[in-house]
Amino acid sequence: MSIAKTYIPKETEEKWYSYWLQHGFFKSVPDEREPYTIVIPPPNVTGVLHMGHMLNNTIQDVLVRRARMKGKNACWVPGTDHASIATEAKVVAMLKERGISKKDLTREEFLTYAWEWKEKYGGIILEQLKKLGASCDWDRTKFTMDENLSEAVIDTFIHLYKKGWIYRGIRMINWDPQGKTAVSDEEVIRKEVNQKLFYVKYKVSSLKSEVLNQDSTSDSELPSSDFLTIATTRPETIMADAAICINPNDERYLHLHGKKVFIPLINREIPVILDDYVTMDFGTGCLKVTPAHDLNDYELGQRHNLPVIDILNDDGTLNEKAQILVGEDRFAARKKIAVLLEEAGVLEKVEEYKSQVGFSERTNAVIEPKLSMQWFCKMAEMAKPALDYVLNGEIKLIPDKFINTYRHWMENVRDWNISRQLWWGQQIPAWYLPTGEFVIAKNAEDALKEAQAINPALTAVDLKQDEDVVDTWFSSWLWPISVFDGFKDPNNADINYYYPTNDLVTAPEILFFWVARMIMAGHEFRGELPFRNVYLTGIVRDKQGRKMSKSLGNSPDPLDLIENYGADGVRVGMLLCSPAGNDLMFDESYCKQGAGFANKIWNAFKLVKGWEVDETLPNPNAVAIEWFGNRFNQALTEIEANFAQYRLSEALMDTYKLVWDDFCAWYLEMIKPAYQHPIDKATYEATIQYFENILKVLHPFMPFLTEELWHDELFGERTETDCCIVAQLPAIGEINSRLLTEVEIVKDIITTLRNTRKTKQISDKEPLELFVRSNSGIDYSNYQAIISRLGNISKFDTVTDKVEGAINFLASTDEFYVPFEEEIDPVAECARLKKEQEYLLGFLKAVNGKLNNERFMANAKSEIIEVEQKKRADAEAKLAIIEDNLKALAC
């Protein structure tokens, strides 16, 4: 194949992705191999690829490709979530553009438009994932409203209702006035916002009567003691007030016990009640109680038998019960009522105030607490086994810092509001009788039979199905089971083979309302966990630490990144800065680094590809070949350990260093022939084998580049299915630790020689002499060829005494001398030695800090302690030599 100057991703990505699909490398069917299963966290069918998706799916693809190369039967199930609120909003917007209003349509007509929208736009994000290289089994693609998956939702609803775990009742819920639906607590995003605190005066009823009876004073002339002042951020809700509450221990208001007050503007009389709930030092110490529009107020109202007056319509406008400003939006009403209160002389003051306000995750509308008849699912009994799975280690949360958070939520779990006031979704299987009673059934026919058991005279026209749909999460909590048809056919070959799945990769923000619920569902419906490991990614943030979002305009288009840096470059860029569970500060420079890494590999390939082989030449590189083989095995050990701990970023960095530093910067430099000279056969074949193994290790991270190089004639002939994607990962061989340690010292010698040349402005082409006074026992004759070649050394010998008139430096405990014709400046040499001494003293202090730390010594592995002890010994030996040299120079 012709070799381009640089790697061109566009020429490889579509070609190899199509090739993998054509040859069925992503497909999986049950067989005798060990399964490895991942189910994708289904993105919203409304979605397009964003940076969070990029990170999440890159991690999944790395895990899946690696499992495939380990000989496992890898199955990655893709799919999308129907996203009730978001999709319905998209469809309503589409209809509006066509001049159609949802309220003018029947349910069936609306759903026809919704399915039309889904078919047109619903597959966009999955097609985008293919650009990233996602190796999903696309034949298994699922949608949460597929027939079998929807049937599973209805079956589970009926199952839980029969157990008494699903019930219908009036509760205070989170209401989205824009989506016009209930949302769960987890779908409410709390944000700190700048608000105003309005101090409003309520006229005290009993005092008013006394004063007026005495001298007929007008309202505006009443003394200030005749008013009670409250502080509120929501003056538009005063018309729904049911009481004013004060703390019974607040001495300021003892005179108000048993009194009543008038609500400003509407003059409705309400009582003053006493409750310890009120904080005496907040605001004025008086609380307006509005049971219909605040959860805490509702609970307070329940304790004191207060009326519930709901003054808001479903769209957030004021209704007739408000008596004033009817039809006004709640926020417009807030501004107008402030003016009315001021005009009435009852607005004492207004202050700036910051507080937490809930926003709908789906529409970004400010949430309204609302008392509503809804369907709920009891969670307490299901939560206990789901908590046990995590606490006993059967399911691992990675990183484990999330265990306490998970436990707190599960131990304080609330019943789940599962009904949504929408049409897009699985309709609740409840049918209402004319009496208001209801029956739960799978379909209308079964519902009629159930109803006729109550009243034989009933017909189908007497029944009406509940208009609501179940919460989208009520379908996705079944995902690991339903994608394998485990409800309709609970003993089918797929579910028995692929379930439980292995790894789940998702974001911490859905740990509770998706991950925890899947664990509950797995236990309830199959009696076992749904997955074994949960890898929790961080949030993708920009350089300033802000979460990437469209609204901030700080998020790059992932497809643009792929266009500019190639899929492999972007994958590497994302993983370089993504430790598990920690937020990553993304910068485009990481993708540039990833693309640069791809070019480094490409250039190494071009170098090796350009060599000519002379089979008559002896092998002069035995030590270099042996060293890299051992270094490769050492790196594989580190990579495997990091993968075992799900430290993918560290595993990639280990691979990066192995390729860039060890293979390209050192090994190829050690063994490459002189310009326009041939290479010996033994070195060439060893290098080709190393390169091929490197491609295997790289493939999960960089699938396109590695597959492209894999098929080059450099690596021999390949059959049609002999592809890198299914190549067996290299096994870890023996490791000669002494050899690795000695070569690290050799590398240190060469690096120091190169730095000395720069300091002394000596050309790389000018040969130098080198002498060593060895204390380590290393036989440098084994490495003379490497040192001489890479350091351009004309003479390398051993000495027993110091070499006068030479620059000296340390490598490990050995002292090296480079003679110079010019006289060495003792002042400069003293400065250099003192600087090195200062560094080593600091280094030694840090090492001793570890070794003197009881906790470290008790918890660290023995091999880690040995490494630290060796570091200490080396540092002490070097310091002794430096001290000798400083004395000799009389520094």
Image (cartoon, rainbow, N blue to C red):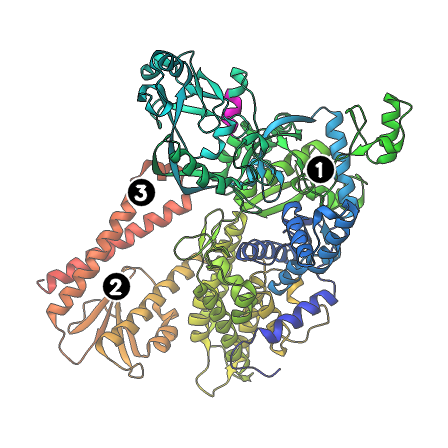
The quadrant the C terminus occupies is bottom left
Q: Residue 394, located in which quarter of the rendered image?
A: top right
Residue where numbered disc 1 is placed: 468
From the viewer's perspective, is the residue at label 3 or at label 2 nearer?
3
Q: Does the magenta stretch mainly form a helix, a strand or a loop? A: helix
From this viewpoint, which residue is outermost toward the bottom?
Answer: 676
State the image coordinates of residue 70 (x, y, percent, origin top left): 64, 55
The residue furthest left is 890
The residue closer to the viewer here, 218 or 157, is 218
* For discs 2 and 1, the disc positioned in front in the rendered view: 1
- Magenta region includes residue 48: no
> Disc 3 designates what residue?
851
Q: What residue span does the magenta drawing correspond to?
A: 294-300
Asked whether the residues under the numbered discs 1 and 3 touch, taking CB atoms below 8 Å apart as contact, a structural biologist would say: no
Give the vertical position of 816 relative to 643 (above or below). below
Residue in the image at 70% along x and 59% along y: 98
Query: What distance separates the C-alpha of mark 3 from that of mark 2?
Result: 24 Å
Comes first in the chain, label 2 or label 1: 1
- Is residue 295 rendered magenta in the image? yes
| Cα gap from disc 1 to disc 3, whole angstroms | 64 Å
The correct choice, above or below, for 99 with respect to 275 in the image is below
On the picture, is 417 further left or further right than 788? right
Q: Mark 2 points at which residue?
A: 810
Density class for disc 1 (Cα within 10 Å; few <14, some 14-19, many ≥20) is: many
